[in-house]
Image (tube, rainbow, N blue to C red):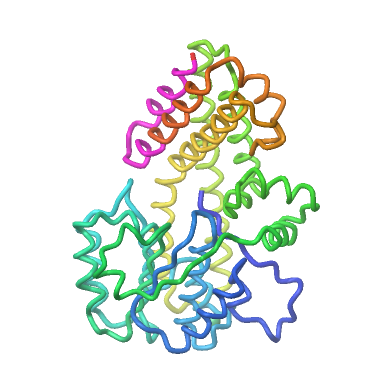
Amino acid sequence: MERPLKQSSSNSPPSHRDVWDQFLGHPRVGSVLKGAAARPTGTYLFVGSPGVGKRNAARVFAAALICPDACGECNTCRRVLAGLHPDVTILQPEGYTFPVEVLRATAQAASQTPIEADHRVFIIQEADRIPERSQNALLKALEEPNRSVIWILLAHAVQPFLPTILSRCQIVDFPPIAEESMLGLLRDQFALDGSEAQRLVRISRGDLNAAAQLAGDSNAVRVRTKAIQLAANTRMSVSEALSGADAAKGFATAAREATESEQAAELVRLQEVSGKEGQAVWKKRLADRNKRALRRVETEVLIDFLSWMGAAFRDLAAASAGADPESLIANDHADLLGEAAGARSTKFWVDMIEHCLEGQLALRNNANPALVIESVLLRLA
Ligand SMILES: [Zn+2]
């Protein structure tokens, strides 16, 4: 589930705050983009691993482009950061990929003049999932020499892009977040003590979003724990496998309900801070965004569930091949995993990693969620 981090405001005096205070974990990249925001050009490609902070960075950069003061606090900044500003379009894949019609419509929209600001910004999340044949639809828009339009593409790697696209991009690399700054962010934001922050950094393998989720969302913690327990159950019966799948579905439902109440609370908050002007527009955008988020939230919990199971199988494979229990990623469950590892062959565990990956892909491709989870768990029975 996407849960952008928010900067705690306690340690900076209000008079010096700007939107770049909310650019987290990458001070060097932040200062490069701050310079770029003064004279923006064309297309930026943010490249880095999942959870490294690209989405947050893109919204902060967009706010700096749209708000003349880059203040981080005004109605304009708030709407950009919440993904609700009419001149900032955020695209994400539908299922696994982007339908070509959506890219064509976006390219079309890019030729229109901005509604409120001097720029229009198009953020494409997971842009590396745009199939090669659809990249040409995008290329046409990138080729338009329209100085008011800024594209921000987010990707895990540059390889999936055509050279014609790459040649038009300024590539901005997001290195892994240094362990120290990740610890600092987790401590500040969630008031964690040092050893708990350390544990989260370890088990989330440097993925700041995953760590933040585990720190702030008890349902996410339950998803992980259940996934590890099921992965390590070497005497699983068919009925246990099926009830494990039911439990996973229950987590997905709980996440959906939590999202619904967060959305209701956000609406109240936004109504309080924003004036009457433009209210109809952002409310419509909010409603659309919320509807999309609700459609995705259950699938994302199940993808997380399989991802944690896959990580547990990785540990089980390592332990069955003789790895030191201390070297396991989920070393907070080292006893359970260490005991289970020898009950199956290393090959069995490696195959299970593969089944988890296939399951995640199937979920992204809108396969029936119950069937996907059941079919992975039944392999353990
Ligand atoms: Zn502002």
Q: Position of residue 273 (x, y in %)?
A: 58, 73
Q: Residue at x 60, y 52 (%)?
A: 206
Q: Is residue 341 left or right of residue 56?
A: right
- Start-end of magenta stretch: 360-380
Q: Is residue 93 magenta?
A: no
User: In the rendered view, would you say 198 is above or below 356?
Assistant: below
Q: Is residue 177 left or right of residue 282?
A: right
Residue 185, located in which quarter of the rendered image? Answer: bottom right
Name the residue furthest front: 322
Q: Position of residue 330 (x, y in %)?
A: 65, 36
Q: Is residue 379 magenta?
A: yes
Q: Is residue 56 left or right of residue 177?
A: left
Q: Nearer the viewer, residue 51 or 220?
A: 51
User: In the rendered view, would you say 275 is above or below 294?
Assistant: below
Magenta-colored segment: predominant secondary structure: helix
Residue 218, located in which quarter of the rendered image? Answer: top right
Ligand 1 falls in which quarter?
A: bottom right
